[in-house]
Image: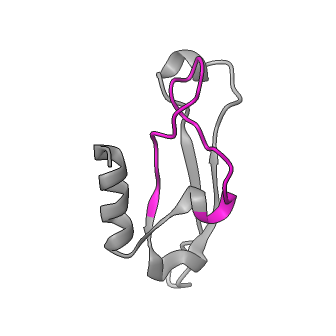
Amino acid sequence: MGVFAQLRQMMLDAQYLDAYRALNGREAGFTFPAWDPHVRLDYVFVPATAAERLKACRVVEVGAALATASDHFPLLAELDLGTNGGG
């Protein structure tokens, strides 16, 4: 098992949820390299106890500056943080 797979497994064993996989099933989710994505190198982990707060997680591949801003495509996660009504 490679180092990235070991780190991912450590997070899962620590009761964190792979946000992208949870919402996108077996879809590849490749983020690297931006000019020819064929590796899933970027992750968002959330505590498993907060899974219901996870609303979306996707690879951002559209935008003029994306391919030149970094060698990775960004991964965007949306979480419902709720409101407490207290300001």
Q: Give, as a single range, the part of the protein colored magenta.
A: 22-45
Q: Position of residue 40 (x, y in %)?
A: 51, 40
Q: Position of residue 20 (x, y in %)?
A: 58, 56
**71 or 11, nearer to the observer:** 11
Quick check: can you spot residue 14? yes
Q: Position of residue 50 (x, y in %)?
A: 49, 78
Query: Which residue extends farthest front?
Result: 1
Residue at horizontal 57%, vertical 48%? Answer: 76
Residue 11: quarter of image:
bottom left
Query: Within the magenta stretch, is there residue 56?
Result: no
Residue at horizontal 54%, vertical 37%? Answer: 74
Residue at horizontal 46%, vertical 43%? Answer: 42
Residue 8: quarter of image:
bottom left
Quick check: can you spot residue 78? no
Residue at horizontal 58%, vertical 37%? Answer: 30
**47 or 30, nearer to the observer:** 30
Relative placement, left or right, of 24 versus 12 is: right
Asked if 40 appears above or below 19 in the picture, the reply is above
Asked if 9 appears above or below 1 in the picture, the reply is below
Q: Position of residue 44 (x, y in %)?
A: 47, 55
Query: Within the magenta stretch, is there residue 43?
Result: yes
